[in-house]
Amino acid sequence: MHAIYTKYLLPSSGLFFKQIPSPQGFVDTYKVFDGETEIGEIGINQDGNWLLIGGGDETFGTPYQAAAKLLETGSIKVIQSQLLREFKANGIEVLEAHGNEYIVRNIENDNHYVVRPGHVEVNQRCECADCYYRDAKCKHQVAVENFLFQRLLDKPFDELTASEWNLLVTDAATSLIRGV
Ligand SMILES: [Zn+2]
């Protein structure tokens, strides 16, 4: 297994890289999958830059950035459906948003909680015991994060601000998609 493969493997995001034979001008080339869906091919050239195979001259510092570009151009929907699955698996439903407050419901026991993700006091961010007594980032907060993330995914690309886009391509694969 090539070093790059493991270094950039993001197990929870479902994004992975499979090495394939390189076309001329590339040192290493990878097919990029999001779950079971192939989203394109990326390669590293002799100068150490990552490019999309057949995708122009734009270069990237890491294979993950190149893969993010593939996501941008094609399969953001794949992430979306994955997120929905995790969201359901979570068992927490976001019912309403009032400004910075969100009402969530535990589907299993019908308990409701108010989540305030931006609250400065960590133990005030959710009403549940996990949060209140243990300062934990509870599943209710994660559900709200997923909800907010989903809202970004639903936004047309040309309306995303730079920081929203950064959130999508970086946190998407690291914290938010991971769910609980
Ligand atoms: Zn909670």
Image (tube, rainbow, N blue to C red):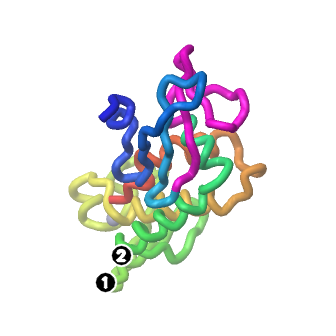
* Residue 135: image location, x then y, percent: 27, 52
Position of 111 relative to 49 (above/below):
below
Q: Is residue 148 highlighted in magenta? A: no
Mark 1 is surrounded, within 10 Å at the Cα level, by few (under 14), some (14 to 19) or many (20 or more) other residues, namely few
Q: Give the SS element for disc 2.
A: loop
| Residue with the mark numbered 2 | 91
Task: Please identify the residue farthest to the top as the structure is shown.
Answer: 47
* Residue 104: image location, x then y, percent: 44, 73
Q: Quadrant of residue 112?
A: bottom left
Residue at position x 54%, y 61% in the image: 78
> Observer-nearest residue: 126 or 94?
94
> Observer-nearest residue: 178 or 121?
178
Marks 2 and 1, the one that precedes in the sequence: 2
Task: Write down the region rendered in magenta.
Answer: 38-65
Task: Please identify the residue farthest to the left as the structure is shown.
Answer: 134
Mark 2 is surrounded, within 10 Å at the Cα level, by few (under 14), some (14 to 19) or many (20 or more) other residues, namely some
Residue at position x 68%, y 49% in the image: 73
Position of 46 relative to 90 (above/below):
above
Residue 74 badge = none
Residue at position x 50%, y 46% in the image: 32
Whether label 1 lies within 8 Å of ligand 1 gets the answer no
Q: Is residue 62 highlighted in magenta? A: yes
Q: Quadrant of residue 142?
A: bottom left
Task: Find out whether the residues at labels 2 and 1 contact each other: C-beta distance under 8 Å.
Answer: yes
Residue at position x 69%, y 59% in the image: 155
> Observer-nearest residue: 163 or 177?
177
| Residue with the mark numbered 1 | 108
- The amino acid marked with disc number 1 is Glu
* Residue 177: image location, x then y, percent: 43, 55
Where in the image, quadrant-wise, is ligand 1 located?
bottom left
Quadrant of the rendering where the N terminus is positioned = top left
> Observer-nearest residue: 152 or 11?
11
